[in-house]
């Protein structure tokens, strides 16, 4: 077992519905298993950097490690400029400010709410666009119908680490004379048609939050090939200062500190290892979930580089017999904290549901996805046997959907005895993938 890995009970995979925690049995995991626990990298290297910066007493204000982090990110992406900031949300806000966006901006609702908040925070109206049902990313075919005389830009999101329709959005933005910005928060290390994400639009932003596969504790960055834009963003992140006492614009304090940069550099050194682990987990889930009715794993393209940091499934209730929410409850009972992404959709969150109450009319695919998508655990602390246990729980739940559906609808706390007495409860065949536990 890896250090600090989650702990699965040392016993066979659950094979009977009466063994599920939702009906009163012991959970399969003693420790809570999260969708993503932080990757750490080489702790010795991290402490060397932290001790060095403490010895030099340069803790923030564009120190040595921030500059090196920016250089390495820009080099990996293949861009001229990386502007490191304290988090991904501020990266978006600074890019939006520096690009002079105003009025209305087209944006998907099926995204993390920070994408939309970054617009609303600056008095810009987010105009929600529906998504492609097969990729979950903004549907370029719906973009033009959302453009008005007040539209100044398009904010695309590279959801799940894969690129949205870059070529099509670029063509629309160019033809309609709109600014094109990409929220690439989860897409560091991924590519599009052989070019690394970060090279498209006027600028792209990355998140290096603790849950990202490469993290800086908290951190973010804007990358661009526009020299003037990069200069402007560097002023904005430092309260508008160009020099010690020369303020040239309205700015904010968004500087990345040296400890965060040290963590980011340490993560970059292990980046390839993290991706390899994520890829193995993705392939394992792909095999395990293939035979479960109504459970569809979102695939990644084999033609592109990808960080594989999300395991995304859709639950078809008509085939699985259970809803996504039912499976979330069943897995939560086993201490598996699967997540509903991006529930309930930004357009149904405060303040957007009051400001734009009719938005849902234009978002049928978004509405559907918010009810059927969930993310499963992955990352460097997860083991192969943990994935087998998680998938077996899902397989068992779907196989006994009728019995569990009744349990869930009645909201019973302990119906184990009832299920054991049910003559109609079928037994499960040989557990799939059990030999991987041996």
Image (cartoon, rainbow, N blue to C red):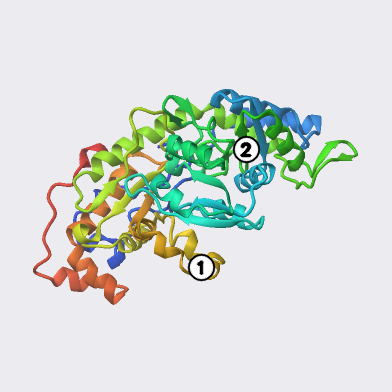
Name the residue rendered at 61%, 38% in the picture.
216
Task: Say which element carries label 2.
Answer: strand
The residue under the point 25% across, 37% down is 436
360 in relation to 129, above or below: below
- Which residue sits at x=59%, y=35%? 202
Query: Which corner quadrant holds the C terminus?
Result: top left
Quadrant in the rendering for residue 125: bottom right
x and y, in percent, of residue 114 in the image: 56, 53
- Quadrant location of the N terminus in the rendered image: top left
Whether 315 is drawn above or below 214: the answer is below
The mark closer to the camera, 2 or 1, is 1
The answer to whether one can see residue 236 in this image is: yes
State whether residue 113 is above or below residue 240.
below
The residue labelled by disc 1 is 353
Residue 258 at x, y = what percent?
71, 35
Horizontal relation, residue 128 to residue 25: left or right: right
Tell how many labels.
2
Distance from disc 2 to disc 1, alpha carbons, whole Å, reads 30 Å
Residue 44 seen by the camera: no
Q: Which residue lies furthest to the left in this view?
A: 423
Q: How crowded is mark 2: few (under 14 residues within 10 Å), some or many (20 or more)?
A: many
Residue at image mark 2: 221
- Check whether the beta carbons of the residues at disc 2 and disc 1 lie within 8 A of each other: no
Answer left or right for 302 relative to 194. Answer: left
| 379 vs 8, nearest the viewer | 379
Looking at the picture, tell me which residue is in the foreground, 217 or 350: 350
Percent of width and height locating residue 252: 75, 47
- For numbered disc 1, what is the local secondary structure? helix
Q: Residue at point 54% right, 32% down?
A: 198
Q: Which of marks 2 and 1 is nearer the N terminus?
A: 2
Q: In this view, does 274 lie to the left or right of 401?
A: right
Task: Name, please, the residue furthest toward the right.
Answer: 245
């Amino acid at each position: 077992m890896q250090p600090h890995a989650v702990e699965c009970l040392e016993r066979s995979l659950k094979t009977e519905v009466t063994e599920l925690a939702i009906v009163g049995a012991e959970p399969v995991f003693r420790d809570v298993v999260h969708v993503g626990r932080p990757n750490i990298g080489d702790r010795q290297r991290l402490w060397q950097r932290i001790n060095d910066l403490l010895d030099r007493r340069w803790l923030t204000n564009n120190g040595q490690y921030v500059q090196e982090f920016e250089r390495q990110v820009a080099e990996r992406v293949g861009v001229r400029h990386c502007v490191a900031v304290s988090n991904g949300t501020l990266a978006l806000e600074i890019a939006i400010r520096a690009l002079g966006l105003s009025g209305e901006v087209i944006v998907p609702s099926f995204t993390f709410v920070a994408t939309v908040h970054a617009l609303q925070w600056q008095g810009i109206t987010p105009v929600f666009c529906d998504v492609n049902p097969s990729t979950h990313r903004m549907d370029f075919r719906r973009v033009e119908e959302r453009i008005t005389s007040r539209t100044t830009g398009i904010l695309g999101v590279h959801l799940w680490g894969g690129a949205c329709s870059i070529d099509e959005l670029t063509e629309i933005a160019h033809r309609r004379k709109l600014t094109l910005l990409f929220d690439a928060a989860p897409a560091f290390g991924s590519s599009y048609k052989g070019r690394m994400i970060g090279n498209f639009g006027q600028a792209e932003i990355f998140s290096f939050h603790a849950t990202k596969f490469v993290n800086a504790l908290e951190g973010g960055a804007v990358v661009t090939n526009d020299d003037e834009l990069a200069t402007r963003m560097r002023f904005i992140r430092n309260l508008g200062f160009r020099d010690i006492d020369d303020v040239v614009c309205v700015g904010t304090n968004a500087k990345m500190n040296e400890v965060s940069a040290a963590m980011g550099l340490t993560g970059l050194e292990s980046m390839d290892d993290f991706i390899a682990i994520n890829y193995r987990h993705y392939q394992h889930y792909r095999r395990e979930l293939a035979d479960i009715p109504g459970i569809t794993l979102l695939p990644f393209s084999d033609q592109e580089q990808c960080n594989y940091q999300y395991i995304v499934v859709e639950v078809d209730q008509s085939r699985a017999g259970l809803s996504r929410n039912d499976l979330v409850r069943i897995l939560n009972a086993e201490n598996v904290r699967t997540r509903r992404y991006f529930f309930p959709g930004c357009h149904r969150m405060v303040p957007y549901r009051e400001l734009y109450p009719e938005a849902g009319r234009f978002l049928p695919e978004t509405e559907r996805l918010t009810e059927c998508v969930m993310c499963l655990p992955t990352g460097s602390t997860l083991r192969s046997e943990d994935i087998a246990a998680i998938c077996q729980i899902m397989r068992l739940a779907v196989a006994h959907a009728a019995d569990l559906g009744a349990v869930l609808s009645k909201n019973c706390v302990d119906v184990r005895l009832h299920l054991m007495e049910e003559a109609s409860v079928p037994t499960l065949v040989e557990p799939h993938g059990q030999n991987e536990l041996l």
